[in-house]
């Protein structure tokens, strides 16, 4: 129920500070955001499970003849054996764990697609990050649906329109789900910047459909 003051004006509730759940349409794209898609209890369990049972790797890429380590750990799981290239490296997927399949099942009804792979990123502290990019790799086909699941520390997810330079920011909290769809990957870059704040670990999963 909305609260009103003596003059009949609506008193904003604390809830108004929370990002709204559901669909947001933006120029050249749209996204769905659910800050509490997974409960606190569920999210704590998944965070622990993923820390322990995922085969985390420190990948690196060749930059001007030098191997440069990614500022995060990564892993790649999926149901096909087709290697996948991103950020200049090629990864062969590992076989789904029970928990990854469980998470996939829970997010598919809202995403309206069946994902066949997931890229995992582990940000160990505020120094770990991912810099401006799009997820418009050719293996994903035109207008890919990307579902991003988040456990652990809250980090800022920034979006930047390639032409207008308009910027948006979403706080990706423990248990949140962000689904990017429409033309978004062709017009908006995204990043998770480093932060000087002291932050705990964060694990992000981006579910994708690789076209074979
Ligand atoms: O950690 C995130 O929220 C984003 C990860 C990402 O953009 C990617 O893996 O392509
Ligand atoms: Fe991305």
Image (cartoon, grey):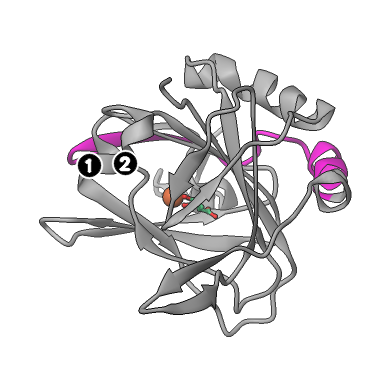
42 inside magenta stretch = yes
Q: Quadrant of the C terminus?
A: top left
Q: Is residue 24 visible?
A: no
Q: Which residue is mark 2?
A: 136
Q: Pointer 1 and pointer 2: residues touching (CB < 8 Å)?
A: yes
Can you say whether 172 is above or below 3 in the image? Answer: below
Residue behind label 2 places its C-beta within 8 angstroms of ligand 2? no
Q: At x 55% / y 69%, what residue is drawn?
A: 70
Percent position of residue 124, x then y: 71, 69
Q: At x 44% / y 70%, what residue is drawn?
A: 62
Dot 1 crowding, Cα within 10 Å, few <14, some 14–19, many 20+: some
Q: Which residues are magenta?
A: 25-47
- Left or right: residue 56 versus residue 196 is right
Question: 146 or 6: which is nearer to us?
Answer: 146
Can you say whether 99 is above or below 111 in the image? Answer: below
CA–CA distance in space, label 1 to label 2 = 6 Å
Percent position of residue 183, x then y: 23, 33
**In the image, which disc is placed on residue 13?**
none
- Left or right: residue 133 versus residue 125 is left
Percent position of residue 44, x then y: 84, 47
Percent position of residue 202, x then y: 69, 59
Q: Which residue is mark 1?
A: 186
Question: 111 or 90: which is nearer to us?
Answer: 90
Q: Earlier in the sequence, mark 1 or mark 2?
A: 2
State which mark lies toward you, 1 or 2: 2
The mark tally for this picture is: 2
Q: Quadrant of the N terminus?
A: top right
């Amino acid at each position: 129920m909305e609260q009103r003051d003596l003059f009949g004006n609506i008193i904003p509730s604390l809830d108004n500070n929370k990002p709204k759940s559901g669909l947001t349409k933006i120029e050249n794209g749209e996204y769905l955001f659910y800050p509490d898609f997974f409960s606190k209890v569920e999210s704590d369990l998944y965070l622990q499970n993923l820390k322990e049972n995922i085969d985390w790797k420190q990948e690196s890429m060749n930059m001007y003849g030098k191997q440069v380590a990614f500022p995060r750990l990564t892993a790649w799981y999926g149901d096909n054996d087709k290697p996948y290239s991103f950020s200049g490296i090629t990864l062969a997927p590992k076989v789904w764990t029970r928990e990854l399949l469980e998470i996939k099942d829970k997010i598919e009804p809202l995403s309206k697609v069946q994902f066949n792979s997931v890229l995992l990123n582990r940000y160990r502290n505020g120094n770990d990050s991912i810099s401006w990019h799009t997820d418009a790799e050719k293996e994903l086909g035109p207008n890919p649906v990307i579902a991003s699941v988040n456990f652990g520390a809250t980090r800022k997810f920034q979006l930047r329109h390639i032409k207008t330079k308009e910027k948006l920011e979403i706080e990706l909290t423990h248990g949140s789900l962000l689904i990017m769809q429409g033309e978004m990957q062709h017009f908006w870059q995204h990043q998770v910047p480093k932060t000087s704040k002291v932050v705990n670990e964060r694990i992000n999963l981006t579910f994708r459909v690789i076209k074979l």
